[in-house]
Amino acid sequence: MTSTNNERFILLLVSLGGIGLSIESVLLHWEFWVPPIIILGIISIWAMNITGNPEYKVRKVAYFAYTMLIIFYHGVHRTSYYDVALVMVFALTVMSFMDDVYMMNLLLAEYFILFFVQIFFLARKGDSAITLDVINISRMLLYLVIVFAVFFCCIKAINDRAERRLSEEEKTNRIEAVDADMEDFLSNISHELRTPVNVVLGMSEMQIKKKLGEEAFSIRNAGTRLAYQIEDIQDYTECKRNKCILEEDEYMSTSLINDVVMNFRLLDNDRNLELIVDLDPKVPTKMRGDVKKLHKIFRHLLENALKFTRKGGIYVKMFAEEKDYGINLCIEMTDTGIGMDARSIAAISEGMYQVNKKRNRSSGGIGLGLFIVYGFAHSMGGFVKIESEKKIGTTVRVTIPQKVVDKTPCLSISRSFVGDIIFHVRSDKYKVPKVRDFYRAMATNLAIGIGVPLYSAQSIKEIENLQEKMNVTLIFMGQEEYEDNPAYFDELSKGDVVVAVSAAPGFKPRPGSGVLVMPKPLYAYPVIKVINEGRDAKDLATMNNGEKPNFGGIKALVVDDEPMNLVVATGLLTEYDMIVDTADSGKESILKFRNADYDVVFMDHMMPEMDGVEAMKLIKAAAAEMNKNVIVIALTANAVSGAREMFIAEGFDGFIAKPINIADFERVMLRELTKSGKGKGGQK
């Protein structure tokens, strides 16, 4: 029984006792003014319970005091001789649920008082109803024994419950301690694994750039998968402990969708699943929030959908709901997979749920993804809702509050655009009908969002009919539709109509064709680019068309006690034309800094003798002493939530986690170089 239910159970019994006493008082013609007070008392104690005021400790005393008063009122009447012990037994039993021995002692003391009051009544002369004889004395002694017996039983019950609670608390504390130790172990293991994974990824990337063999791609992909799983372990332990720390940054809304598209292209899609991305053009261009956690939410949702979908496709929808504090960013991931039952959905929020736990399962993963999604969403003030049906599919909706930095719509078309658009897709080509519905929903929502006329056509004849009636300037279609009539569309593309084909990697139109190719998966960015630029549209594969920054001439010192990390970091930095020197300890880094002029120092955290924090502070002190301006960036495998804030608070200028993410590296470098006035982060 919960504490709330226990409190109300006690009140119910006390109320019944009070009502019974009021009835008895009326029937026996006791003081007429007391029953209304008793009823008023019942109303008062229930009002306390319902409102929750005052606090429980005070309410408990009020309930007990009320009980003692009505017992005393009952016991001081002559006619209570036969039932005062019964009333006290009832009171002892009820009040024992409050688990307070002191209250039991007070009730027993009250019974002694009433016991002597009743003896006084018996001893008084002139009382013809009751006489002080052997039978009545024996009855009183029997009542006394019964009350004592009930009292000791209640005390024993209270002590037993206290011991049981203590035992359960100790057991819970032991379990929590074991869980905490295991989570610490997992967190430490994941931290230690980051260093060798950083080496694997870095060295494989070097091999790929040197074109030393296809095996390097397999090594990199395996290393990337391991890096993700290491992150998952850390994220899981933080979610389990409710210790997720938010790291707010400004970000472009389109970067989230670009991340989904790029991840899908990297994942193993041997089942040829379709990915349809529906980005509402009205989503604000720039927002502020924990973009790293948002990226991870997208990744987990996508991997989970891909893992349990055998045929059909995955529909990703992102839109925004305006609120006083900014927006609610809404993310939906719908698949045509195996689905889940209600029990499975309920188990997900508890962590480590997997549809198939057998060792020979083929679905992969370590079963933490959706629990991490729940944890991140809740830590950011959002919520998760799952709708699923066995053998039909699953929809996961994540809603997260975000601040708006730039409320301009993230996608828009040029004012110079005129004409009508045809969406040419054969409905019969999809083995799973829901995929057709996904494409239609995406096309319809996009057309409404940017305010352009869109018409559906399933055949060449329908296209020709629309051309006669409308000013058709654009036709979007799938690869199969083009391959059914390539000559027709090639000829059409040479005229006033722009023809764009969403196709699988490796597809090329026929020689001489003017058809534009939009690599799958189809999403809003290439569509908008084609609408705005027409035949001049280029680089339709990704939203990320920014050129690689040029950090040429920047002198960098990399400090790490792991030699292979120095090799990897040196290889990365030289790709950006930086002048690189290395140090394998904090002491050596200070000596080198005093003897050379460095623009930026990349400092590892955990090193023997002198850790990175102490080395950073000594370098900063040396820079101030020598009137130098230096940027010190933490480059470390310590990547738990809040690590960046911790390092910034210690005095570091920036933070980059291992394994090194190129986008993070470029963003931190551009920001810090601009802030410091070194300003060499141009474009190649």
Image (cartoon, grey):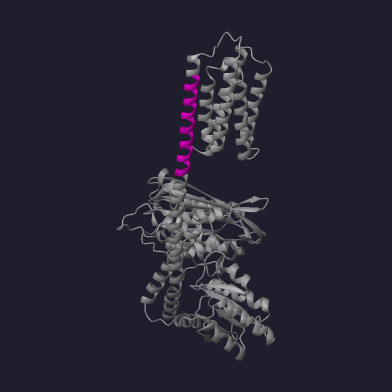
- Residue at x-position 52% and y-position 86%: 582
Q: Report x, y in % for residue 177.
A: 45, 57
> Number of labelled discs?
0
Name the one closer to the observer, 21 or 69. 69
- Residue at x-position 45% and y-position 62%: 233
* Residue found at the very far left of the displayed protein: 360
In this view, 223 is above or below 357: below
Q: Is residue 492 left or right of residue 651?
A: left
Q: Report x, y in % for residue 291.
A: 57, 62
Q: Magenta segment: does it hold 160? A: yes
Name the one closer to the observer, 309 or 453. 309
The overriding secondary structure of the stretch rendered in magenta is: helix
Q: Report x, y in % for residue 341.
A: 40, 44
Name the one closer to the observer, 144 or 647. 144
In this view, 105 is above or below 126: below
* Residue found at the very far bottom of the displayed protein: 595
Q: Quadrant of residue 547?
A: bottom right
* Residue 165 in view in this figure: yes
Q: Which residues are magenta?
A: 139-164
Q: Report x, y in % for residue 269.
A: 39, 62
Q: Quadrant of the C terminus?
A: bottom right
Q: Magenta segment: does it hold 154? A: yes
* Residue 511 in view in this figure: no
